[in-house]
Amino acid sequence: MKEIVVSGIRPTGNLHLGNYFGAVKSFIEMQHNCQCYFFIADWHSLTTHPHPDNIRHNVKTILAEYLACGIDPATATIYVQSDVREVAELYLYLNMNAYLGELERVTSFKDKVRSQPDNVNAGLLTYPSLMAADIIVHKAAKVPVGKDQEQHVEMARKFARRFNTIYGVDYFVEPASYHLSETAVKVPGLDGSGKMGKSEGNAIYLVDDAETIRKKVMRAVTDAGPTVPNSPKSEAIANLFLLLNIVSDQTTCDYFNDQYNACTIRYGDLKKQLAEDISRFCTPIRERILELLKNDAYLDRIALQGAECARASAAKTLREVREIIGFRGN
Ligand code: TYM
């Protein structure tokens, strides 16, 4: 039997390089060997109170972008979270065994309390139990995510184990985060520190055109340049090199590294090369996105087909869960 894989992305804007290299690249590589469920986490996006028009538009956009990246609907199940209501029922059960103290200690919750103090809602607090429901509803063993989501997957493991212990069963699989490289990926932004993110305003989107990419990269934060050979890189420069490592070939990376170590580097040249290599990567994806966005009927069909398949898997789990808890199975 194929290993089961689940992962999702919130529809709060376009996919950026962080999403691609942190998660989507793994989806593409895993889809042919594993049984994959990739979904659009529209319930999760409610934690920041979007408008209905935004939800519809953003869900369609992410669907087109998933497909444009190379996720194949003939092999992977692509669906919208809110189409599978069984997930909400499992979320309810998991919340009964999720404790305030542990939820309050989650890093993403603490960040949100700081960044949106006027909207600290219960959905934010219980974000990890909804995410756990997404994952364990299909009994997934692997969850391809970037570094920022590792703690959430760790919580999903804990909730799965706790359910098994409370009801004395060996029912849920304990999921683990998965990444292509040895360690989880954290794609940096262009602002000198931290990760690339939608809300950080430092992202390059897959749908950006060459000129937009060039402008963003040329504005990226740098420093005054090395004065001593082989000196360590500042965070801003290390980030640019990290991006170069992701999109450029080895010869290009070696060339700029040598230039840096010899103190002859011109950051303008590095940025020009980086912008070109990012554009080369994004352009074919961008073209497919724009093409797919014209085809509403096709996108609707994919979402419908994915919903049916994901619902069948989730309904089976919920029938069994209800019986384990002591409710009627159907
Ligand atoms: P989201 O929408 O913030 O991000 C989607 C995926 O992209 C990864 N990612 C990154 N990876 C590396 N570097 C970056 N700069 C970067 N930015 C984003 C994220 O790690 C993630 O894998 N809670 C999730 C969505 C979700 C989910 C799930 C994921 C809901 N239920 C169940 C897996 C399984 C989220 O907000 O991801």
Image: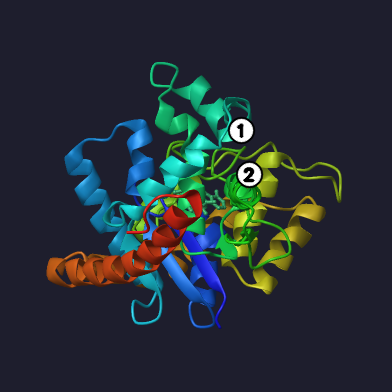
How many circles with numbers are drawn on the protein? 2
Between residues 55 and 2, which one lies in front from this camera angle? 2
Residue at figure coordinates x 63%, y 58% from the top left: 174
Residue 155: image quadrant is top right
Give the percent coordinates (x, y) of residue 8.
44, 56
Give the percent coordinates (x, y) of residue 7.
48, 60
Task: Give the mark nearest the N terminus, 1 or 2.
Answer: 1
* Distance (Cα) linking label 1 and label 2: 8 Å
Q: Which mark is residue 142?
A: none
Residue 241: image quadrant is bottom right
Q: Kindly identify which residue carries mark 1.
A: 107
Q: Quadrant of the C terminus?
A: bottom left
Between residues 33 and 71, which one lies in front from this camera angle? 33
Residue at figure coordinates x 18%, y 66% from the top left: 300
Give the percent coordinates (x, y) of residue 165.
66, 49
Is mark 1 in CB contact (under 8 Å) with mark 2?
yes
User: What amino acid is at disc 1?
Assistant: Thr
Q: Quadrant of the N terminus?
A: bottom right
Task: Please indicate whether residue 270 sits to the left or right of residue 258 in the image.
Answer: left
Residue at figure coordinates x 65%, y 68% from the top left: 252
